C-alpha cells in the first residue's frame, strides 16, 4: 500500500496541507518499495551490518558477504510505516549494539527522506558474518 504525503491526517507528520508540502496543489504518494530501498540503503550505511542471501524453498542462494544487501519489507499505511529487516552482523560485534544502530538509522533515514513516521523496525539477524566460511578446527 502506498500513502499520500501531505494530506491532512492525524498520522501525517506536521499536519501541513497539500498546498504547503509539495510546493503546490496535488498529492505525493510513496510506494512500499521506495521505503524498502531507502531502508536497505540505510542498513548498508551502518558499520558491521550486512544483508543475508535470498532463500528459495529453504535453500540459501549464495553466501553472506560484506556487500550482501539486507532483505527489507515495508508497509506504508496512511502516514505510518512498518519495516522488517533480515540481516547479518559481522563477528565479533554485539548483535544488540549493531541492531540498535540499524533500527535508529533506518528510522532516521526513512523519516527524513519520505516524511513518513516509522512505527516500528523489526529486525531478524539470520547470520553471523565471519572472516572464514569454513568451520574452525580445534587442535
Image: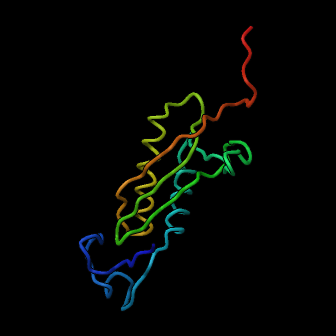
66 or 3: nearer the eye?
A: 3
Compared to residue 94, the image places residue 114 above or below, namely: below
Q: Quadrant where the C terminus lies? A: top right
Query: For the point 59% across and 51% down, which residue is it?
Result: 70
Compared to residue 49, the image places residue 54 above or below, namely: below
Provide residue 81's location: percent of width, then percent of height. 39, 63
Residue 25 picture quarter: bottom left
Provide residue 26's location: percent of width, then percent of height. 39, 90
Residue 110 picture quarter: bottom left
Q: Residue furthest top?
A: 139
38 or 64: nearer the eye?
A: 64
Q: Is residue 60 left or right of residue 103?
A: right
Q: Is residue 62 left or right of residue 31?
A: right
Query: For the point 53% across and 51% down, which residue is it?
Result: 43
Provide residue 8's location: percent of width, then percent of height. 26, 80
Q: Quadrant where the N terminus lies? A: bottom left
Provide residue 84's location: percent of width, then percent of height. 48, 53
Residue 87 picture quarter: top right
Q: Residue furthest front?
A: 57
Compared to residue 72, the image places residue 34 above or below, namely: below
Picture colour scheme: rainbow
Compared to residue 130, the image places residue 110 above or below, namely: below
Query: For the point 44% across and 51% down, which residue is it?
Result: 105
Amino acid at each position: 500500500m502506498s500513502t499520500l504525503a501531505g494530506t491532512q491526517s492525524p498520522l501525517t507528520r506536521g499536519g501541513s496541507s497539500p498546498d504547503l508540502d509539495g510546493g503546490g496543489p496535488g498529492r505525493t504518494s510513496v510506494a512500499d518499495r521506495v521505503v524498502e530501498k531507502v531502508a536497505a540503503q540505510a542498513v548498508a550505511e551502518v558499520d558491521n551490518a550486512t544483508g543475508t542471501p535470498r532463500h528459495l524453498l529453504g535453500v540459501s542462494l549464495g553466501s553472506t558477504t560484506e556487500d550482501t544487501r539486507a532483505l527489507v519489507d515495508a508497509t506504508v499505511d496512511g502516514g505510518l510505516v512498518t519495516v522488517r529487516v533480515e540481516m547479518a552482523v559481522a563477528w565479533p560485534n554485539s548483535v544488540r549494539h549493531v541492531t540498535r544502530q540499524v533500527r535508529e538509522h533506518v528510522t532516521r533515514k526513512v523519516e527524513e527522506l519520505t516524511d513518513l513516521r516509522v512505527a516500528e523496525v523489526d529486525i531478524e539477524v539470520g547470520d553471523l558474518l565471519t572472516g572464514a566460511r569454513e568451520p574452525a578446527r580445534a587442535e
